[in-house]
Image (tube, helix red, strand yellow):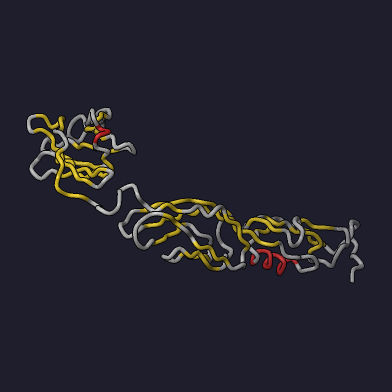
Amino acid sequence: MAVGCGAEGVVEIVLTDDDGRVQSSRQTSPGASTWSAWRDLDGDWARFTIRKLAMAAPAGWLHLYGANADGQVFVRSTQLGDPTRWGAWTPLPLTVRATLPLTDAPQVTWPGDQQTLLGAPVTLQLLATGGTGQITWTADSLPHGLTCTTTGLISGVPAPGGPALQFVTLTATDANLASGSASFTWTTAAQVPDLLGMKQAPAVAELRAAGFADGPATLSNQCLGKAGSVVGQSHPASTVLPEGTEIRLTVSTGLNNKGNACDVQ
């Protein structure tokens, strides 16, 4: 996409689609919030396959520069008497990325959706095909504790504190600044600790440290444990669940259903 404003004060937007078809839309008047319908600027658009655009207005009328799929550069200008009309494309003795077609960007190899345990070391090497020269990598929205090097190595130890499901976007950029990207999900999970027999406060602390949330506790009058001790948990120990899952505890009151103290050693 390219944008310019000529001497008459009207902004014009020109874009090119995946087929190289160049289209234009103009403000209906200077400063207007309404725009003309999109129109094709070329009846023989397929002959040019324009992929990249730039625009300038050095003398009050617009000049549009375009590069085709082979890197050849063209220019065209609006007509002095009618700024709504464009002249034909004229080739310039220039090429861009002469050794690299504009469409030859790195293609990221999808690593697949990932699921890892909190506290378990992670190593994932990213891969890409195509492009020119050294590939530089970035990864957005990784789980806490993980980082990505510029060479595409994701490593670290997942830590509690983030959402269980992250949508990660990978970007590979080559020496010519051409780039490709891919996205996947990364789920962090944890093993439910064994909290039976523990006092409620340290049990809740251990639950949170493991990466889970604690829900409202249920009180029990069944004399299954000493007063204030955990006698049940909503998910069994060693169960693997997504980070942040709510675990509810059942805590003994130390009294039976008649209000008498339990005889629990």
Instruction: Locate residue 119: give its quadrant.
Output: bottom right
* Horizontal arrangement in the rendering, residue 257 relative to residue 12 (left or right): right
Q: Residue at the location (42% across, 55% down)? A: 171
Q: Closer to the camera, 69 or 167?
A: 69
Q: Residue at the location (11% across, 29% down)? A: 82
Instruction: Locate residue 245: give its quadrant.
Output: bottom right
**Above or below, 255 relative to 25:** below
Hey, which residue is sitting farthest bottom in the picture?
265
Q: Closer to the camera, 183 or 245?
A: 183
Q: Quadrant of the C terminus?
A: bottom right
Percent x, y of residue 174: 35, 58
Instruction: Locate residue 129: give its quadrant.
Output: bottom left
**Above or below, 123 relative to 89:** below
Percent x, y of residue 78: 13, 35
Percent x, y of residue 210: 65, 65
Percent x, y of residue 263: 92, 67
**Above or below, 264 relative to 130:** below
Q: Residue at the location (42% across, 60% down)? A: 138
* Horizontal arrangement in the rendering, residue 92 relative to residue 164 (left or right): left
Q: Quadrant of the N terminus?
A: top left
Hey, which residue is sitting farthest front in the picture?
99
